Image (tube, grey):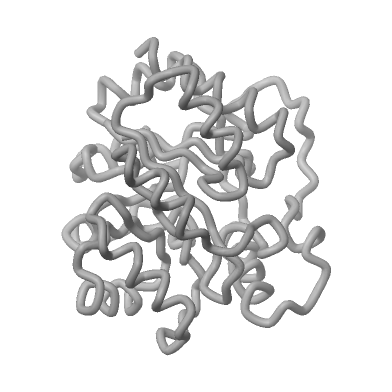
Amino acid sequence: MIFLAGGIVKFKIITEILRKRKIKNLCVFDGVKSPWHGGRVNTYVKEFSLSIVKYYNKRNIGFYCTFSNDIIDVTLPKENKILEFLNQNPLNGVIIADDNFREYIRKHYPNLKICLSITYFDSIDVPKNIKELEDKYDYICPRFEMIFNPDFLKVINPKKYKIMLNDTCRYGCKLWKKHFSEISRYNRDNIGDPHKIQECWLNFNPDIPSKYECMDLDINALKKCREIGYENFKISGRELNDQVYTDEIIEYLNLLEKI
């Protein structure tokens, strides 16, 4: 399965790509303006769109809503209406980082697929409860540092994992959890400078020769993923400008066709 970022904010670009090429086993994901949103500040997202999700579902494409804030108030009515609508089609799902929220969704919206967000992980070490997480979630998006770790590969079922192809964070970043927690806080209370909160706090050098420093996967790494047994891949970039986004999506779709 390919999970493509920007299902709402990049809708026009995605529909144009879909007109030009047939993509098998596709889902899209995006955040919406909500205190439940995580991963990106709310500045980069739009309101939820019933018509857009219906468009995808009619074409057998699932839509996953990024409700990965680290604190979730399950009483919010607008967000529950979104879950209710998504729950009508088993193609759809949510991306979350709060395990209590997972229990709530399983109880009240049982048709939804649930993916554990990459932002859940506060360390590059293999979690001791990784098999327990596999039992709880339909998909897990692990940190890049884990995906080729021999200790990780010894215990996991690779079919449960969704591998991010273009993670621009720095390898082993010590500010990972703190950064995503601050993004979550901003989306809940809307206080602070969203640009300073969202952008990389380390101001790393994008011209570093090794792409692994920024954790983008090249063709050789993708072939290794296939050999391991990974079947699900995530292409991020919903915050990028339209041209950069388009170029990245096309680049990675082309790479995936080669493996």
The residue lying at 51 percent from left, 59 percent from top is: 49
Quarter that holds the C terminus: top left
The residue lying at 77 percent from left, 79 percent from top is: 191
* Name of the residue lying farthest toward the bottom: 75
Q: In this view, does 234 lie to the left or right of 91?
A: right
Q: In this view, does 96 lie to the left or right of 172?
A: left
Q: In which quarter of the image is residue 181?
A: bottom right
Q: How many labels does the image show?
A: 0
The residue lying at 33 percent from left, 57 percent from top is: 93
The residue lying at 62 percent from left, 56 percent from top is: 174
Q: Where is residue 60 in the image (x, y as percent from the top left)?
A: 29, 39
Q: Where is residue 145 in the image (x, y as percent from the top left)?
A: 46, 41
* Name of the residue lying farthest toward the top: 258
Q: Is residue 193 left or right of residue 175?
A: right
Q: Where is residue 95 in the image (x, y as percent from the top left)?
A: 40, 59
Q: Where is residue 216 in the image (x, y as percent from the top left)?
A: 56, 29
User: Image height check: is 155 above or below 103?
Assistant: above
User: Image height check: is 74 above or below 149?
Assistant: below
Q: In this view, does 148 lie to the left or right of 251?
A: left
Quarter that holds the N terminus: top left
User: Image height check: is 247 above or below 144?
Assistant: above
